[in-house]
Image: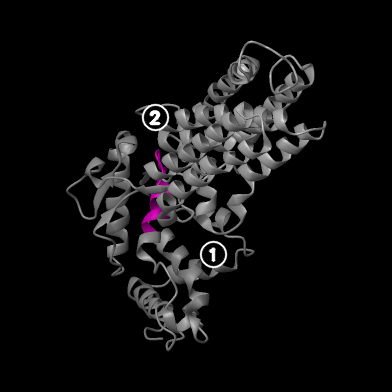
Amino acid sequence: MWLFSHQPDFAVTEGYWESVTAQITMIGIVPLTMCAAAGAWEGMRLKRSRLVAGGGGTSARPALIVAVSQVSPVLGVGAGCTVWALVCVAERAEGAIGGPDFGVIALLVLLVCAYTVFGFALGWILPGLLTVPGVATVTFLWLAYPVAVEPFWLRQLNGTNTGECCALDRVLDSRALLAPAVTAVGLVAAAFILIGARSLTRRTLAVVPVVLTVAVAVPLVQPLGFDPSKARSVSELTCSGGRPRVCLWPEQRESAPKVETWVQHAAARLGRFGVAVPSSFRPTSVRPSEADVLTSLVGGIMPDSMPECAERGPWPGEKAYLALGMWLELTAGGHASDVADRIDDGGKSLALVQRVRSLPVGAQSRWYHDNLTALISCDDTGALDPGAYAGGSP
């Protein structure tokens, strides 16, 4: 769990508790699989002991009561793993306001109980030593594999998809917690039927609670698609009075003076070249650097998608996208080294943009607007060569 949560590509919004807590269900794939396998082992072992009714014995205690006592150590370890999952990610929220999302923690605890008890039930009714690895394999596939397949709502039922949450402007949708919780309750009910029933006919009734709970859960998550989050309430934003207005989430307010200064200076530099900046700006990271702010500001200026005509034929302006973005960032006050670190094209685009920036202000402005037109249409090829602007008109 520790190694998984400390991979370089482990995606989390640093300093944001909602995103940090959401990761614990994905880390929980490990203990959930092991709890299901350990539950199956305990069920198989108790049945083979022939000490209780249903396993060939004559114990005075019902099988369900004995089952609970047998899996209690597994449940205890599973609860400990829930705490450990939070420890594994808590450092990513260091200094963040607020605290963990207890709804996610409660969901993981419920999943631990559900998969442990259901694993016990399978160990109780299925013969052979292959039951334990079989339960482990099927549980792991169910928890980990739906994220790679369609329909998208399928991944919302196992409880581990909350790890897809959340950017700073998003929060978990309550349906993404409720649906897997309902499904888990169905597994627990099915397990109790499997353990308590004495005949095959009665055990087939275990399908009923699973089908019913899935029938309730699917309509809840179908509208979500693959995304377990929803937009965060804009009432939590605090906005400045400048232009552009800088709007910050509570987690970003400590950075407000620096961010506002960087944005106003960048807007003033771009304004000299006739570049219109958005009327409002929101940085995307909790503790943004100046490079983060400039990159995000430029992203709001550039077209956010290719023109519709590009889907039907050639789009000559496509080659201008990278150069215009780099020019905007450098003109706004960015450093060439920061841009070069992100763009791996042998320095060709950076060299082109540096030549453009050596032109007079008016020529640079024409270069930008001509090539911006080419980006948003398919009829204009633009003119990237700065030499075409050196004499005045391209």
The label number, if any, that marks residue 96 in the structure image: 2
Looking at the rendered structure, the secondary structure element under dot 2 is loop
Mark 2, residues whose alpha carbon is within 10 Å: few (<14), some, or many (≥20)?
Answer: some
Pick the residue in front: 86 or 349: 86
Q: Residue at x 49, y 34 (%)?
A: 185
Please say whether residue 172 is visible from this viewpoint: no
Seen in the picture, residue 381 relative to 150 is either above or below; the reply is: below
Task: Count every numbered label the image shows and give the total.
Answer: 2
Residue drawn 73% across and 19% down?
A: 46
Element type at marker 1? helix
Seen from the viewer's position, the closer of residues 200 and 234 is 200
**Which amino acid type corresponds to the residue marked 2 in the rendered image?**
Ala
- Residue identified by numbered label 1: 350
Residue 242: x and y in percent read 19, 50
Residue 92, percent across and down? 50, 31
Measure the C-alpha gap from mark 1 to mark 2. 37 Å
In the image, residue 303 above or below residue 217: below
